[in-house]
Image: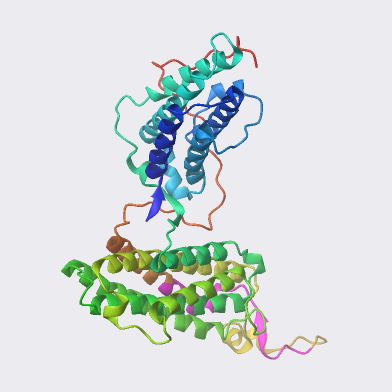
Amino acid sequence: MRATYEDLLRAARRSAVDAAGSRYKDRSEAVDDWKAVVAASAVHFRWLRHRFRAADLYDEPAVQSDRPLGRLAQAIGAGSDLLAIQDAQNASLLDDPRYLRAARAEIAAIALTGADCLLGHTRSRTPERRKAEATTRELETLARSDALRGGLGEIGLLAAGGPAGADHEVSMLPRHAARWERADDSVTVESLLTRDLRSTTAQIRTVCGYVWHLADHLLASDHAELGDGQRLELGVLKQAVRSAEAGALRTAESWRRRLSDLDGLAGTPSEAAFMDLRAALSRFVRPGGGLLEADSLVPDHGHAVSILQAVDEIVWSAEQVARRQQRATAALVSQGRLFVPREDINRRDLRYLNRPVNTRPLQSRWLRTTQPELFVGLTACLAWTADHLTVASEIARRLAGTSQERRPSHGQPWRSPGPYLAIPEFLSPGPDLDGLER
């Protein structure tokens, strides 16, 4: 299961409660850690499209620490990091005033809880106390801004970019799959050659084969204790990944007639990450060198649930890789970086049959072109594979119980926080900062 925005805010609230009941031996450490809380809150509010004016009171840079308030600052920062990595579709939730009010109120309430620690370590009529009181007044205003108390709604289902870690063997599979997907996302289109894309095609075929094997053993095991609906969906999942594998096989055949480089091994980071994933899958299904029987691979219902969660993450990563392969191929075609056999172009453009007078001899076999109609077979196979992986991913998410998670898709342009939105007019606009010492 991936950590959601609601999970991270719940963890931040626990950190705030711990900080509120803690005591610092050095008052200056409490003040420094509170600056970190204010700075993290300001960044978080910025993603929630609100300007936290009280942060202007603290000009000094905040320093992270492992003390109670420092841990609270880190927890608040983790929530803003999750908002920052969302794709454009998920980020559209941050245009809904209801969700924004709820999230602002929650962050303000969390910071207010931690503020009790600082107020207990500062004397009255000191600059630190006056700044803290001004900050808490603005936080109280934000905490009251969600008058309907409707909860976080869909924004609470925004998920982090990777699966949660664990230490048992099955849980390592999703982590390796996530590393493979992130490594593939780090490769720029400008650096790709067709041998890299052929390697990606082979990787997708291999992943589909392993997923089919896991689904088949889940169905064959007498100890999985799956319901009839789950067994039916597993059967459809097997068909979807088998179709995706067949599409990848046709894609591999298409690459033989659409080149941009000589043969050779791919040197992309995703190749190395995939080797780790394949090794982990191989160790899981054949720990002693031979394939495990279904009852040995799935000895009980708990293992079946863990395998379903692993399949969910593996198929999701494969789908993301396949979609990026589609985009990379389209970019190579538009840039004229793919070669096609001359005989294929001759069938569409007779001008290539004759050589103009006083020109160099014609290149005998390959030509570069940007004509998309010459790549219809290749792009159709890529789309077939990606579409069937999308179907398989939807089924796997239902089986793993993660359908409600709103996961970010990589390969999208970097986002910036949206413009500020005003809080309701009937509330106080914030603290008066003009009369405070900086």
The residue lying furthest to the right in this view is 358
Q: Is residue 26 above or below residue 177?
A: above
Confirm whether residue 46 shows in the render.
no
Q: Is residue 66 above or below residue 392?
A: above
The residue lying furthest to the front in this view is 25
**Which quadrant would residue 243 be assigned to in this image?**
bottom left
Picture coordinates of residue 14, whole percent (x, y): 40, 36
> Can you say which quadrant of the picture contains the C terminus?
top right
Q: Is residue 78 above or below residue 169?
A: above
Q: How many numbered marks appear?
A: 0
Work out whether residue 266 or residue 289 is closer to the camera in this orientation and state it. Answer: 289
- Compared across the picture, whether 156 is left or right of 43 comes to left
Picture coordinates of residue 76, whole percent (x, y): 48, 37
Does the magenta-highlighted stretch encompass residue 355? no
Picture coordinates of residue 110, whole percent (x, y): 42, 30
- Compared across the picture, whether 236 is left or right of 373 comes to left
Q: Is residue 364 above or below residue 110?
A: below
Task: Please tell me which residue is depicted at 49% across the width and 72% down the height of the picture.
Answer: 277
Work out whether residue 44 or residue 199 is closer to the camera in this orientation and state it. Answer: 44
Picture coordinates of residue 405, whole percent (x, y): 36, 52
* Colour basis: rainbow
Confirm whether residue 28 shows in the render.
yes
> Can you say which quadrant of the picture contains the N terminus?
bottom left
Identify the magenta region: 361-385
Does the magenta-highlighted stretch encompass residue 364? yes
Task: Please tell me which residue is depicted at 52% across the width and 19% down the height of the picture.
Answer: 121
